[in-house]
Image: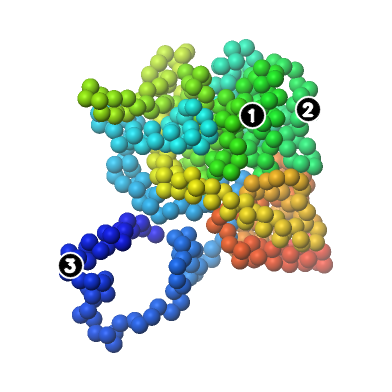
Amino acid sequence: MPFIPHTRDDIAAMLKECNVARIDDLFDEIPVSLRAQDTPGIPEGLTEMEVGRLMQDRADTDGRFINFIGAGAYEHHIPAAVWQIATRGEFYTSYTPYQAEASQGTLQLLYEFQTMMAELMAMEVANASLYDGASALAEAVLMAVRLSKGSRRVLLPATVHPRYRDAVRTIVRAQAIEIVDVPYVSGTGLVDQHALSSYRDDFAALVVPQPNFFGMIEDAHTLAGLARSKGALVIGLVNPVAMTVLAPPGEWGADIAVGEGQPLGSPLSSGGPYFGFLCCKKAHVRQMPGRVIGRTVDLDGRSGYTLTLQAREQHIRRSKATSNICTNQGLLVTAAAVHLSLLGAEGLARVARACHANTRMLLEMLGAIKGVDRVFSGPFFHEGVLRLPVPAEEALRALVAHGIIGGLPLGPDYPELGESILVCATETRTAADITQYGENLERIVSRRRLDPPCAVRGS
């Protein structure tokens, strides 16, 4: 849907210029008998998201899937204005702004992005983005090891996204950094604090996911305190939308905050491209990877923007480079900056609260089905884990046949969870969507009890 920027005042000014009182007067040459007197089937007063959904439903000739999978990539509503602005030629074709005198618009936008991310994370400094959330976490691990100047061990909880853990191990493998797994408590899905306390005190950093991969809200303050008591740094791995309703990393003493920026204006797009963000305390800024945009004044006292810290291989001797990141996800960051500015703090918090409310409704409805149980107890954000009384893979395939992407099977990455799935509901899900999921899953589960195992296939 294109963005139409005209306000009521704009429209009034154009009508005055045309010397007419109403838009309808522009079409007075059309005979009254040919004009539509009403608009049947067009509801009144819908939001942009609701209008988009209505148009999708009515144009749906090839089938549309209702998405209940998250696991690190989330279906949020993106206002039409976001990409209408981001794809303007000035932003769409911009490259790394080496020449500040020719790149003030791009530099200012990146500076505003850094400012918004630093405020959202309650941190002092933010860089101008990284590749994605997984590589951002790996860069944070490398940064923490450089800052520790001693230990090369990092504690990585099992409640961190499995693919993020894979990426971290792959990236740090050749640098003699040891990644130590921290287990979770089976009843809560939270980091095992007792196990954490038992580790010896020679590790560089602890990663604290908030919320964690299971959607559960970790006791971040306590985990951060345990790390600091052992002389280690704290890396907060966070969902940026959740930070509007949960305590941000800066408030629980994190030294570095990273995460995936996709929820801020980037569509799912079959898995990317996305972008990662990284914030830190000012004391650590010299070890920050990527680059930082700074604000200054020129000889006439006017504000100006320039690349300030860019300790990359093309700017510094290889041995002193903080990373080999040679670019950033500029277009996605542009969209994120526009998205954040349009929603504002209050709007982003409304999104977070709507996500939580929809997920609570989803978990309650699915949990009421006989044999379906919540695996973990305690507070959650917008995801949860359910154990099914039928094979998870088969149930999810059966749901797809009904136009529902039902969640992520956890057995491949967490064998101890058996036939469990991770489900998610963002603000884009409606009560009708959730009811449709519940009704279909109940039929699938009931039929599986009565029929042979093969009956679920293709249900």
Residue at the location (74% across, 49% down)?
420
Q: Residues within 10 Å of mark 3 (few under 14, many from 20)?
A: few
First along the sequence among labels 1 and 2: 2
Compared to 108, does 366 lie above or below? Answer: below
Give amino acid for label 2.
Answer: Ala
In which quadrant of the rendered view does residue 298 lie? top left
The kind of residue on which mark 1 rests is Val
Tags 3 and 1 touching, CB below 8 Å: no
> Are there few (<14), some (14-19), or many (20+) residues within 10 Å of tag 2?
few
Q: CA distance from mark 3 to mark 1?
A: 62 Å
Earlier sequence position, callout 2 versus callout 3:
3
Q: Is residue 178 above or below residue 214?
A: above
Image quadrant holding the C terminus, namely bottom right
Q: CA distance from mark 1 to mark 2?
A: 14 Å
Is label 2 in a helix, a strand or a loop?
helix
Choose mark 2 or mark 3, whichever is in front: 3
Indicate left or right for 201 with 336 as reference: right
Q: What residue do we see at 35% from left, 82% from top?
A: 37
Q: Which mark is residue 309?
A: none
For residue 208, above or below residue 415 = above
In this picture, is 178 found above or below 17? above
Question: What is the number of the mark on residue 18?
Answer: 3
Determine crowd level at label 1: few under 14, some 14-19, many 20+ residues with C-alpha closer than 10 A. many
Q: Where is mark 2, residue-wise?
A: 195
Between marks 2 and 3, how big is the CA–CA gap? 74 Å
Residue occupied by mark 1: 207
Q: Residue at x 61, y 66 (%)?
A: 432
